[in-house]
Image (spheres, rainbow, N blue to C red):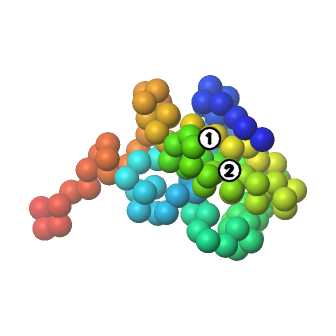
Amino acid sequence: MRIYIDQVFESMKREETVILNVLPQSEFRKLHITGSENLPLGKDPEAFCQEVVEKYGRKKNFIVYGERFGLLDSYMAARALEEKELQVLNYSGGIEEWFRSGLPVDGTQIHPEPEQGA
């Protein structure tokens, strides 16, 4: 159920892999793994799973991540998807470990949005 940073980097090259950031959209906009998609876990794991299936189908391999190791958001998302018999791995190091490792990231924390009216 767990995947490590080097395995995530290799897996993201495969077309059948979807890297899912499960944090709120505001956090995703600040900083996320380049090429990852945002689908917040929220308070209803059932609704989260339904949205994943509707958007991506059942034949993808999912890697979920959150902010950092020790927080349960990605673990809870992986567990919910696993219960729906989807192929899922949890990258528990999260965006914090990914960023510290110097791997590709995007977001306003890296590329600030232009000011309104500028």
- Which label belongs to residue 62? none
Would you place residue 107 above or below residue 92 in this image? below
- Residue 11 in percent (x, y) is at 68, 34
The reply to whether dot 2 and dot 1 touch (C-beta < 8 Å) is: yes
- Of callouts 2 and 1, the N-terminal one: 2
Q: Nearer the viewer, residue 103 or 13?
A: 103
The residue drawn where x is 67% and y is 73% is 44
The residue depicted at 62 percent of the width and 41 percent of the height is 92
Q: In this rendering, does residue 16 appear at all?
A: no
Image quarter of the N terminus:
top right
Q: Which residue ends up furthest to the left in the rendered image?
A: 118
Towards the viewer: 59 or 68: 68
- Residue 97, compared with residue 27, is above or below; it is above
At mark 1, the secondary structure is loop
Determine if residue 41 is in view: yes
Toward the right, the furthest residue is 85
Horizontally, residue 118 falls left or right of residue 79, namely left
Dot 2 amino acid type: Tyr
Query: What x and y, as percent, mark residue 106?
Result: 41, 44
* Residue 113 pos. (x, y %): 26, 55
Q: Is residue 91 left or right of residue 78?
A: left
Residue at the disc numbered 2 = 75
Q: Quadrant of the C terminus?
A: bottom left
Q: What number is the disc on residue 92?
A: 1
